[in-house]
């Protein structure tokens, strides 16, 4: 009883909201940006050329090139063939690793 009286006195003195002790905390709202793919990591043979979002790129000596995703572009072109990009899985950073077809396959040659 003394504890309740002390709590009431403190609430009045410091203008505390005692109802806050009874209420459940509301969960924080979930924030999403709507961007699923941040960029693409094209992996291929050095010197291999492809087109993405209207520009031509050449794979450097390292064997891969990373590009920021262009809005509403879900295909790339290699050897005059348009191929989809969104079939490759997303990594934890929102990048898709896209293995470029080998030059022999893109030319239509059999292995």
Image: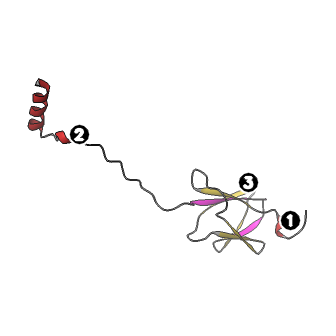
Label 3 neighbour load within 10 Å: few <14, some 14-19, many 20+ = few
SS of the residue at dot 3? loop
Residue 70 x, y percent position in the rendering? 58, 68
Name the residue: 82% across, 68% down.
106
Q: Residues within 10 Å of mark 2 (few under 14, many from 20)?
A: few
Describe residue 3's horizontal placement relative to residue 71 as left or right: left
Q: In the drawing, does residue 58 fall left or right of residue 108?
A: left
Say which of marks 1 and 2 sits in front: 2
Magenta residues? 37-51
Q: Within the magenta stretch, is there residue 4?
A: no
Q: Are marks 2 and 3 in contact (CB under 8 Å)?
A: no
Residue 58 x/y as whole percent: 73, 65
Precedes in sequence: disc 3 or disc 1: 3
Q: What residue appears at the point 76 percent right and 56 percent down from the top-left corner?
A: 61
Which quarter of the image is occupied by the C terminus?
bottom right
The label shown at residue 62 is: 3
Name the residue rendered at 13%, 29% in the picture.
4
Q: Residues under labels 3 and 1: Cα distance?
A: 20 Å
Q: Nearer the viewer, residue 51 or 84?
A: 84
Foreground: disc 2 or disc 3: 2
Q: Nearer the viewer, residue 99 or 21?
A: 21
Q: Which mark is residue 104?
A: 1
């Amino acid at each position: 009883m003394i504890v309740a009286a002390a709590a009431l006195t403190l609430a009045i003195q410091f203008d505390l909201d005692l109802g806050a002790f009874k209420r459940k905390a509301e969960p924080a709202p979930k924030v999403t940006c709507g961007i699923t793919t941040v960029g693409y990591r094209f992996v291929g043979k050095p010197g291999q050329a492809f087109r993405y979002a209207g520009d031509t790129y050449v794979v450097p000596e390292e064997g891969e090139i990373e590009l920021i995703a262009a809005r509403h572009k879900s295909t790339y072109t290699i050897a005059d063939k348009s191929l989809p990009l969104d079939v490759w899985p997303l990594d934890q950073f929102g990048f898709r690793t896209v293995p470029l077809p080998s030059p022999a396959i893109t030319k239509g040659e059999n292995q």
